[in-house]
Image (cartoon, rainbow, N blue to C red):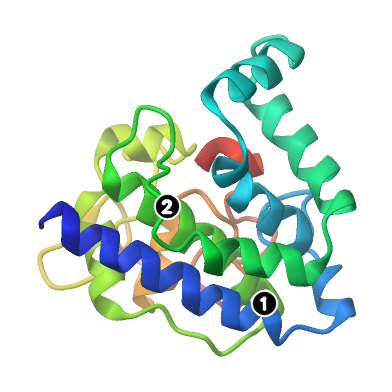
Amino acid sequence: MSRRTIASAVAAERRELADVLDSLTPEQWDAPSLCTGWRVREVTAHMSLGFRTTLPGFAAELLRARGSLHRMTDRTARRDAAALGTRELAALLRENAGHPWKPPAAGPIGALAHDVVHGLGITVALGHPRRVPEDRLQLLLDAVTPRSLRFFGVEPDRHPAVRGRPGLVHGEGTPVHGKAQDLLLVLFGRRLPPGRPNGGPEGHRVPPTLIA
């Protein structure tokens, strides 16, 4: 898949999520997301951090957090969510749809994963009907590796087999079937609502910024 195609998918994802955010009520902005400890507004603030922070600024924030990426992203998300209005947070995604930011040490597919998974962390938690287009989901499902599973706290040798499309299997054990976007969240270590794959108290729970 070409870099241009992935960049186009990233831009479309940001614009579409911005449209969703513009439609939310104040109560929904303050509702919890699938990112443990973060409301919708903290997730959105975190998603825009890369557009608003220079490399020296990022390094300074990381130093202030004593080298902990988790502490840094959690602190900046809470700070920025309190400082920025909801319209401004949504506009940051739309106005930076074509921004080339990507997660540290990740390629272009990392930027798509970042936006899709965090966006689903908002919409799934809210019960919003938005569905991520299948072609974007397939790009991300095809990019999952045993190493990425472990990074997000999912042990391939202990995890049920997660089936996306025919021939795509991750892990061992009793197969788990579900919607592609639900399966993607499972593979990125998210705990889904009850009644969905790996939902409920027994589901996976990971710090929100492991996907930072």
Relative depth, front residue between 57 and 41: 57
- Residue drawn at (27%, 66%) of the image: 8
Measure how far apart labels 1 and 2 are at the Cα level: 19 Å
Q: Position of residue 197 (x, y in %)?
A: 48, 69
Q: Position of residue 14 (x, y in %)?
A: 48, 67
- Residue drawn at (47%, 58%) of the image: 115
Q: Position of residue 149 (x, y in %)?
A: 37, 40
For the question of whether residue 31 can be seen, the reply is no
**SS at badge 1:** helix
- Which mark lies nearer to you, 1 or 2? 2
Relative depth, front residue between 184 and 63: 63
In the displayed structure, would residue 70 be above or below residue 46? above
The residue carrying mark 1 is 21
- Residue drawn at (17%, 52%) of the image: 3
Which quadrant is home to the N terminus?
bottom left
Relative depth, front residue between 143 and 87: 87
Q: Position of residue 19 (x, y in %)?
A: 58, 82
The circle drawn on residue 60 is: none
Kindly indicate the quadrant of the structure image that contains residue 148: top left
For the question of whether residue 64 can be seen, the reply is yes
**SS at badge 2:** loop
The residue carrying mark 2 is 99
> Residue flagged by tag 2: what amino acid is it?
His
